[in-house]
C-alpha cells in the first residue's frame, strides 16, 4: 500500500524482480497514482488468483476499481495509465493494439 | 503436558497486558494466492483481531497449532484470525495451501521485529542467529486494545484453545 490515508482504487499484481512490473510501477509513481501492491509467485500454477481477477495469469496486471478496467501486459497498462491519469490524449483502444508480447 | 521429565522453560516474556494497546506494525500479509503490506490497524479498523504468533512454517509446532485452529473453525468467528512468523511470504503461501488453511492469512516478519515489539521473542538453541516468536495469542478488539493474551512458557507448549475461544466470543456483538 502506498498511501496510508486512502484506499487506492488500483491493485497491481506483480512479481518480485519482474522488469515489466517495475515499468508499470515507475509509471504509477510518475503519475502519482496510489495503488495496492500485491505480490504473486512466479510459477503460473500459483497464479489462479490473478487469472480470476484479470482473466490472464500474466503479470503485471492491474485492477482499477474506479473505472472497472482490468488489464495485463505492461505496454497496455502504461498506455492506459497515461491516458486515464496523465491527461494524455492517447486513444485507449490503441493500447490493446500495441500490446507488447511479454508473458512474465 | 506430563512426559515424566522436565520440558524446557522459555526465558521470561514481556507481552502487552490486557487493557494495553497492542503494538502497531505493518508487514506483508500473505494469503494462499498473494501478499501485500497491511497494518494491524487496517485489520482492527474492520473489527476484532486474533494475532497468533507461531514458530517458523514447518512440521510440527506450526502445523499442530494451525490444524487445530482450522479444525476448530476459527475462520467462522467475526474476527480476523491472522498468524505471524519469521517465514517468508513464499513459505507462508505454500504453508496455507499445503495444510488447507486458505481461510487464514499470515504476516511475514523474517526480522522478528513484531515478536520483539510484543515481548515474545525466542532465541533458538542450535539454530545460530535465528530468533522467532514463541507461540503466543493476542485477542485484540476494534480499538486495538488487548483483551486476552496467552504466551507459551515452555517448549513446546500449545495454546489453551477453549479459553481463547471464550475471549474471542466475548468480543462478538
Image (spheres, helix red, strand yellow):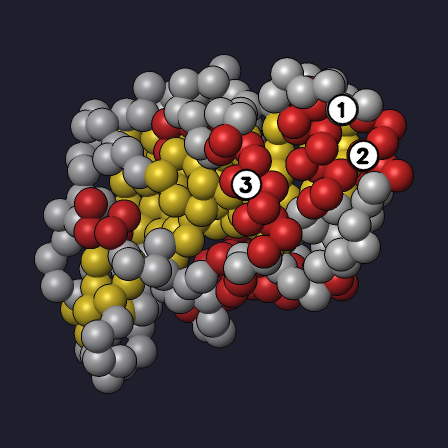
Classify mark 3: helix, strand or loop: helix
Classify mark 2: helix, strand or loop: helix
Pick whichever of labels 1 and 3 is earlier in the sequence.
3
Residue for point 53% across, 26% down:
A31
Left-right relation of B13 to A23: left
The answer to whether the residue labelled 3 contacts the one labelled 2, judged by CB atoms less than 8 Å apart, is: no
The dot on residue A90 is 1
Residue B28: percent from left, percent from top: 44, 46
Q: Nearer the viewer, mark 3 or mark 2?
A: 2
For mark 3, name the chain. A
The dot on residue A25 is 3
Q: Is residue B111 above or below residue B148?
A: below
For mark 1, name the chain. A
Classify mark 1: helix, strand or loop: loop
Q: Quarter holding the N terminus of chain B?
A: bottom left
Give the quadrant of residue B94: bottom right
Residue B130: percent from left, percent from top: 26, 71
For mark 2, name the chain. A
Q: Is residue B38 above or below residue B117?
A: above
Q: Give the camera-side residue of B37 and B92.
A: B37
Q: Nearer the viewer, mark 1 or mark 3?
A: 1
Label 2, on which residue?
A: A95
Q: Nearer the viewer, mark 2 or mark 1?
A: 1
The answer to whether the residue labelled 2 contacts the one labelled 1, judged by CB atoms less than 8 Å apart, is: yes
Amino acid at each position: 500500500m502506498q498511501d496510508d490515508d486512502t484506499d487506492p482504487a488500483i491493485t497491481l499484481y506483480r512479481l518480485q524482480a519482474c522488469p515489466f512490473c517495475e515499468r508499470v510501477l515507475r509509471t504509477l509513481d510518475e503519475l502519482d497514482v496510489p495503488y495496492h501492491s500485491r505480490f504473486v509467485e512466479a510459477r503460473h500454477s500459483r497464479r489462479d488468483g490473478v487469472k480470476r481477477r484479470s482473466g490472464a495469469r500474466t503479470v503485471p496486471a492491474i485492477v482499477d476499481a474506479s473505472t472497472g478496467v482490468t488489464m495485463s501486459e505492461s505496454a497496455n497498462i502504461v498506455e492506459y495509465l497515461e491516458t486515464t491519469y496523465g491527461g494524455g490524449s492517447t486513444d485507449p483502444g490503441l493500447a490493446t493494439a500495441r500490446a507488447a508480447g511479454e508473458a512474465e | 503436558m506430563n512426559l515424566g521429565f522436565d520440558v524446557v522453560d522459555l526465558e521470561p516474556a514481556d507481552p502487552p497486558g490486557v487493557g494495553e494497546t497492542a503494538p502497531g506494525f505493518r508487514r506483508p500479509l500473505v494469503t494462499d494466492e498473494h501478499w501485500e503490506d497491511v497494518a494491524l490497524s487496517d485489520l482492527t479498523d474492520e473489527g476484532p483481531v486474533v494475532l497468533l504468533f507461531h514458530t517458523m512454517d514447518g512440521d510440527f509446532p506450526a502445523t499442530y497449532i494451525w490444524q487445530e485452529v482450522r479444525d476448530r473453525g476459527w475462520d467462522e468467528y467475526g474476527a480476523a484470525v491472522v498468524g505471524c512468523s519469521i517465514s517468508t511470504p513464499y513459505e507462508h503461501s505454500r504453508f496455507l495451501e499445503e495444510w488447507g488453511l486458505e481461510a487464514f492469512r499470515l504476516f511475514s516478519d523474517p526480522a522478528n521485529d513484531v515478536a520483539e515489539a510484543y515481548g515474545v521473542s525466542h532465541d533458538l538453541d542450535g539454530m545460530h542467529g535465528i530468533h522467532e516468536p514463541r507461540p503466543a495469542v493476542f485477542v485484540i478488539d476494534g480499538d486495538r486494545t488487548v483483551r486476552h493474551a496467552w504466551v507459551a512458557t515452555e517448549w513446546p507448549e500449545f495454546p489453551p484453545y477453549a479459553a481463547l475461544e471464550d475471549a474471542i466470543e466475548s468480543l462478538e456483538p
